[in-house]
Image (cartoon, rainbow, N blue to C red):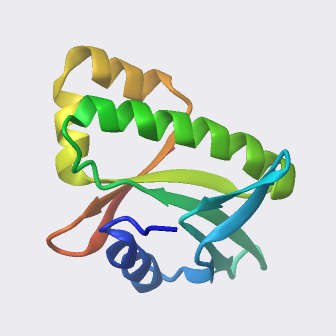
Amino acid sequence: MAKDIFHELVKNALQKNGWQITHDPLTLKLSKRNIFIDLGAEKILLAEKNSQKIAVEIKSFVGFSVLTDFYHALGQYQLYSLALANDYPDWILYLAIPKETYKILKSDDLLSELLDKLQIQYLIFDSENKDVLQWIN
């Protein structure tokens, strides 16, 4: 399985923000096949004495077209959401994308509307500063 070019960057940024990487990759069953989400992570919430668990699919958007990459990412996200709901129903799936890509998508009226209407959680990361910038639910 090939890792995204930003895999280690996002992994390190999550760790820097207090997340413990529990799976690299997170393997799920879909029908008779295995599928792989890039990362699984857990963060202990001391006030609640429990933990928050997330799965993160990382996308670099370095293909021929941001729009084509976005279509591909949306399809993967939907498929992974279904599998995650079956195997790990208390986990939240995030689509990790670079801030530059997020700005491009938000600058287009139709794509911006799609971003707002789709029920997708985004993790926006800064590839230069190597940090998580924003969590969008």
Left or right, residue 96 beside residue 30: left
**Residue at the extreme top:** 110
Q: Is residue 42 left or right of residue 13?
A: right
Instruction: Report x, y in % for residue 91.
Output: 72, 58
User: Where's residue 118, x and y in %?
Assistant: 51, 26
- The spot of residue 23 in percent (x, y) is 64, 77
Pick whichever, 65 or 45, lies toward us: 65
All told, the count of numbered labels is 0
59 w.r.t. 130: above or below? above
Q: Kindly identify the residue that appears in the image at 44 percent across and 40 percent down.
A: 73
Identify the residue shown where x is 65% and y is 39%: 79
Q: Position of residue 27 (x, y in %)?
A: 71, 66
The reply, left or right, for residue 59 in relation to residue 104 is right
Q: Look at 23% across and 36% down and name the residue there.
A: 66
102 above or below 22?
above
In which quarter of the view is residue 60 placed? bottom left
| 133 up-or-down from 41: above or below | above
Position of residue 135 in the picture relative to residue 137 (left or right) = left
Picture quarter containing residue 78? top right
Q: Nearer the viewer, residue 38 or 135?
A: 38
Residue drawn at (58%, 81%), measured in percent from left and top?
Answer: 21
Q: 123 above or below 82?
A: below
